[in-house]
Every structure is written in structure tokens, then in C-alpha cells.
Image: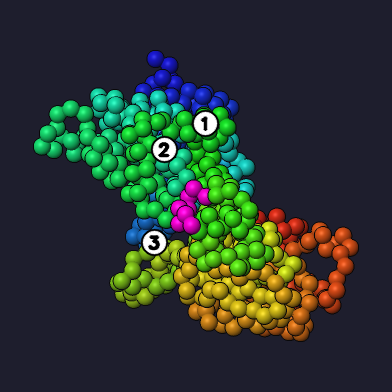
Amino acid sequence: MTPSRQSRKRHGLVGRERELAVARAVLGAGRRLLFEGPAGVGKTTVALAACGLLGRDAVRVDGDDRYFDSRLTGWFDPPLVLRQGYREESFFPGPLVAAMREGRTLFINELNRMPESVQNVLLPALDERRLQVPHIGEVRAAAGFQVVATQNPVEHVATGHLCEALRDRFEHLTLFYQDAAEEEAIVAAATGSDDAALVRTAVRLTRATRLHPRFRTGASVRGAIATVAIAERLWAESRDPCGPVSRETLRRAAEAALTTRADLRDDSDADFATALDELLALVVDRGEGPDVALVAATGGRADSAAVGADNAAAGNAADCAGAQDSASARVELAERLGAADEELDGWKLAGALSAGTLTHAGAGARACAQRLAAGAVLRRARALVGPLRAGTRDVLEPWNSSFGGELALEPTLENVLGKEWPEVGEWVVRRRVERRRQVVLMVDTSLSMAGEKMALAVVAAAVLALELHPGDLAVVLFSSRARAVSRLGEEVRPDELVRRMLAQPCGGATDIAAALETGRTALARGRDPRRSGLLITDGVCTAGPDPCAAAARFRDLHVLLTHDDARRSGSVWITPRRMVGEAVARAGNGGIVRVDGFAALPRRMLDVADKVLR
């Protein structure tokens, strides 16, 4: 039996011939390999099978955001250090040092869940095949040392970006969901079920969650495995376990298996049970396979790549189908815009709301428009960042009986050496805490911002809301006057924040001083010592006093200075104006981030959140 077949059999791998062939080529060339894909596509299984191609057992590491550098490289045993000092005998090698010394493969599962400081430890080992360990010296990698890693896409909860330097050291291989036949084979093998009809239905039901417009993210094949296992157990314990599994038993099993694995869209007004009933009607009652619907949604591309972890393939159709507002409100909204009900577009509605087009529409129609617009805005924001993990930092503090952290050996030894009875407070522990920063975002809503510009500014605000801890973002909207639509300490959901921002049509002049005064007052109410102001403006002030005096009262003010190509092309201004953007940035003790065109604003906000605010 070839090494490839042995590895496939050992790890129970179904399909994936193409992926394993690429992995074999990458590893055979002596390169490092990074697998990426949504949860449940088999990244770990394929990665371990790829490690098996090298003919050596892998040293496995499972990443998390509390992983310390010493857990990867190694640590000294405190009693041994006290007795005999920093010697090799006192050192316990971590997985990285062990793999380097023994010439083995280091397998890191979910690499992008590790803090950036831990990721950086890998760089010299990958580049130079050597590592400097304090008190030990240089560790050189033996022949055969290799690194294989996996990561989830950055839009998934508790994940983050790999640092650019580390990502550049890996070859990349993306895994998508497998086709229906292979998933059925996986489920049958995992459950041992001989009920082909049940297996096929469970797989179809699970795949449907990845396509239906009510769902933001769908379930992996684990959902189908759990559905079959639970359904067969329930049916065996029923009073009449003869014949095929009943529809009601299948429903109970699917609800238990899929609820934690599939997420509804933020703009869906249905609960999970209602959405599941719709899937059952499609898959069980009508007998339709979800891949048929996929062909229609993606223009005939019914391959595994199109069946992503999210509903990107569903696209704009979900703008209207995902929000089941009352029929009368949707009809009124469509009539107001001169469009058919099914043509309602959430992104266009965001621009219409900011332009005041729907000011005189009924309350139901406006609420419907805000719901659809918020969904479109959040989809754009999540496409950039998703709900990323918060930044973290290490703190050293005295050990106490209520908390046990990782012992910080060197500062502890400085405190206790030479003392017969050290005090409890002289033992120092290290722990990782969430890096918090409170932010007041000030957004221009003057007349010049109406339409798509305001929609893009709201996307930028949503990006920031997704990056920060709930309650750490206040938003101030300003034109001729300024008002806060959220305050520090108020835990506003991102979709609710978007609706509040879109509820105020753009209009009036631009009083940047009023924005800064209101923002500074809002920031003063924050309790976190790390507080910043962010101002989105084109720097054109058409009302109010010079804003530089107000900017100087901030301890940390950053200005996202937008450039409007239309204005730079020679537009005629009637209202007197002052260009104050750069002066405000200098006075605000922060920095300036130049944004070339409003379309780049959400991406530049991501840069600010990732680099400046953390």
C-alpha cells in the first residue's frame, strides 16, 4: 500500500485526492503548508493525513488566544531552577523546540487563534531553522523539521489575522465543503448507519443551511453526522421503531444538531424552528436537493467552492427574502421607490435613507427599509472583518489565592532568592487580558454625504463596532449640529447601531467644532483609561468656529480624512468653507489617515482598528 493510501486509511479520509496531491507536492518541496477553510470541512483531518505523508508522527499544538510564548518554546521548572539554576536539566522543551530537535513535523491547529506575539516566535524557526531560547542558547532544527498549520477564515468568531510576515512563509491551500456524495460517505462511515435514505436526507438538510437566505452561516457535515446519530437513537427508543425514521423524529434530531452549527441572519425575523421547518418543507416534503437551488443562485456553478461557509452565493436575493416584513409595508416601500417587491435592494435603500427619500413614507415602510439596509451594511462590514477576537496583552501581577496564573519565573526569582520564607505577594504570575479601548466615532452627516457616501460611512462604523467590545463605542452624527446616537457603556448591537445611523437623513452644513465638543463630552463619560476619538471628515468646515481649539482638548484624536474626487475637479461652492482636516489632526494629538475616495473608507477603518486602536 502506498504512503498516500496508508495515510488516507489511517485518518479515515474520504475524497480529497486533489488536495492531498497538492499537499504532497508542497511538503515534498520542503515548504510549509497552511490549510484554510470554514469549520467542519475537514482541515484537521486532511492536515494530519498530509503530515502522515512524511512518514513521521506530528507534534500537535491547538491554538487559542491565551497561548503563551513559553508554551510553544519551553519552560523552566521553578523548583529545579531554585535548586540548580538555569540548566538544561531544568528545562522542559515545548512542542516547537521538541519538533526542531527531533526533526519532526509541528502541526499547529487554528494558527490564527494564537496571539501575534506567539506567532512571531515561529519566524526564525521557519526562516533560518534556528531559535534562540533564553538561558539555553541556540536550538537548530534537525533534518526533517516541517510545519503544517490550519486556520479558519478571519470572519469566524475568535479568529484573527495572521501577521503578514508569517503568512508569507506558508504555501496556502483552501478547503471547501465536499460534494453531496462524499458527505454522505463521510456520514455513513462516522455513524455506521445503513439507512441510506436517512443519511441522504440529513446531508441535504445540512447543505440547505449553507444556501437558504435566512442563514448567515451554514452547518458543516458534523451537523449531518449528529442528525443521523440522534435520529436513530430517538427512533430506537420510540414505541414503534419499525420502518423508516419518522419526519417528526428527524425534525427533533435536526433541531438539536443544527441549532449550534448554523446561524440565522441578523435581519431575519424568524426563529430557528421556523427556518428549520422551511428547510424540511424543501428537502423532505418536496424532495428537492439543495444543490438544485445552488445552480439557480450561482449561475450554474454547483461546485464545492460555490458552497461557502456563508451565504455569499445567495447575494442580493437575501436582501429582501431574509427580512420577512409585513406585506403592506413592503408594498408601500416598493411603491415609494417605483420598484417591484422582489427588486428591493438593501444597499440602495441605505443610500435612499440617508438622502431622505423615505422621510415621508409610513413608519412600517421606513422600518422595513432600515431592516433591509442594515442587513446589507453588516454583510459588507463582515466581509471585511467579521466578529474578530479582541486584542490581548500580557500583564504581570502578584499571585493571590483567588487567581492562579502562569508563573513568571524570572521576576519571581528576583523577589524570592535568598529569602527563607517569601511572602505570597512576591510570587509573580503572568496572564493575558483583553486589550480594551473606548472610542467615540464622529461622522459627518451634512448634505454632501447623502446617498452612497453615507452608506459607506455606516459600513465603516459597523467595522469598528465589530472590532470593539460591546459598550466601548459611542457614535456622534454631526452637520449643523451634533448629537450622539450611542454612548459609552451602552451595549448596542451592530445592527441596531446601523439602524440608528440610517434613521437620520443627511442635510445641513458642516460644523466640525460642534462634533468635537459633543464627542469630547461623550468620551469623558468613559471609564477605561485608554480612550480615543475618531473623526470621519473631508476636512471642509462650512459652519461654526475653528475646530482646532476643540481638537486640542483630546488626548488621542485620529482623523480619517476623505478626498472626494468630484470636489477636487472644480465644483462651485456657494457656502464659505475652510479646509481644516490636517490642522485638526495635528491639534488632536493623534494622527491622520488619508482615504482616497469613499469606497476605500471601510477598509481604511479596518486599518485604523487593527493598527492604531490596539
Q: Which residue appears at 67% of the width and 80% of the height? A: 481
Residue 224 visible here: yes
User: Looking at the figure, which quarter contains the N terminus?
Assistant: top left
Res 400 quadrant in image: bottom left
Where residue 516 sits: x, y (%)?
67, 79
What residue is shown at x 39% (from left), y 53% (from top)?
270
Which of the pair 485/189 is nearer the observer? 485
How many numbered marks does the figure carry? Answer: 3
Q: Residue furthest top?
A: 1
Density class for disc 2 (Cα within 10 Å; few <14, some 14-19, many ≥20) is many
Which region is colored magenta? 320-328
Coordinates of residue 317 in the picture (x, y in percent) = 54, 44
User: How far apart in space, not on screen, are marks 3 and 2 (Cα)?
Assistant: 45 Å
Label 3 crowd (10 A; few <14 / some 14-19 / many >=20) = some
Residue 551 falls left or right of residue 486 = right
Viewer-nearest residue: 595 or 378 = 378
Can you identify the residue that label 1 sits on? 295
Of labels 3 and 1, earlier in sequence is: 1
590 vs 225: above or below? below
Residue marked by disc 3 = 406
Q: For mark 2, what is the residue?
A: 208
Tell me the amino acid under the disc marked 2.
Ala
Earlier in the chain: of badge 2 and badge 1, it is 2
Give the residue type that dot 1 points to.
Val
When the figure is inspected, residue 564 is found, relative to residue 287, above or below; the finding is below
Residue 576 pos. (x, y %): 84, 77
